[in-house]
Amino acid sequence: MVEDIVDLLVCPVCRDDLALRPGVLRCARGHSFDVARQGYVSLLTGSRAPGTADTAAMVAARERFLGAGHYAPLAGRLAEVVRAALPASTGATPPGEREGGPGGTVVDAGAGTGYYLAAALTGRARGVALDISKYAARRAARAHPRIGAVVADLWRPLPLRDACADVVINVFAPRNGPEFARVLRPGGRLVVVTPERGHLDPLVGLLGLLSVDEDKERRVARSLGAWFREVDRGREGFSMSLGPEAVEAAVSMGPSAWHADPEPLRERIGALPNPVTVTASFRVSVFERA
């Protein structure tokens, strides 16, 4: 909830501390930001609408697909990596949770519905879900009781204090190297998940979806290399058996949704085997500050 992460937030206008008042976050200079009734707060500034924000339909498709468990192996792998990077918990353990679980703060930069962040929060850890889409933030705000959801642009200075995060996770989202380095504490970890070549085969070829370009790995390295060094790398790959509705959700939740014409797409999906076996392939990279 927003009230649980106020101590981590700063005003996106003047960078002063924010304080929670009934229904609003306000800094000492009078900049204020309404807390939505759905439980998130928007710390976007300016009047220009963000052109890259996921639409309501894209977010709904993602929730259907992830909620069905199709990417559960990836969520489990990410949770293991995050858990290993979190500090030992201090203080009383909440009822129903294992004594001695990890504490600390996890920031999900590009959190979407909060699915991966919720999976990573164990023990007493709390999470900050950052996403430019208000529709995603609405979902993330209720994904876990210890998540606070914030609408923010990852390409701008993040509305977070210096050195406030133990782990930053970045799953299929833009990477702002200097800001990730700024908000991570000394010894903290950045965990980046990217799709590999062959991800979503054979759908990419059969449905004309956007493919992972060959320069993806080099672009990730360039975006982070001045601030981070890679300390671990692994691959998570598995097969999925998808029916037509799941295939449509997989297409509709990703970047191909911006380019696909719905009716011809449904016709092509209808011609696929039911179910169709689809490959999921991801790279999971762990970085520390250079």
Image (cartoon, rainbow, N blue to C red):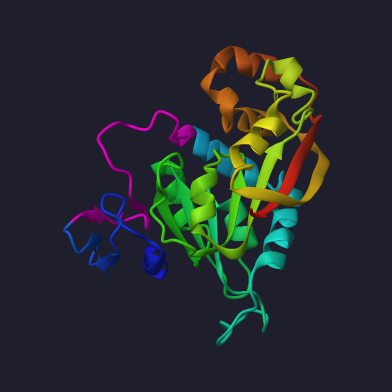
User: In the figure, is residue 35 to the left or right of 255?
Assistant: left
Please name the residue shown 76% across and 31% down the image.
Answer: 199
* Residue 40 falls inside the magenta stretch: yes
Please name the residue shown 49% across and 57% down the image.
Answer: 183
Quarter of the image that includes the N terminus: bottom left
Query: Is residue 112 in view?
Result: no
Please name the residue shown 78% across and 37% down the image.
Answer: 281
What span is colored magenta in the figure? 31-57
User: In the figure, is residue 89 to the left or right of 199?
Assistant: left
User: In the figure, is residue 27 to the left or right of 99?
Assistant: left
Q: Position of residue 30 (x, y in %)?
A: 16, 58
Closest to the observer, 137 or 90: 90
Q: Main structural element of the magenta stretch: helix, strand or loop?
A: loop
Query: Is residue 143 in view?
Result: yes
Q: Position of residue 285 (x, y in %)?
A: 72, 48
* Residue 67 falls inside the magenta stretch: no
> Which residue occupies the extreme top position in the image?
264
Closest to the observer, 227 or 68: 227
87 to 68, vertically: above or below = below
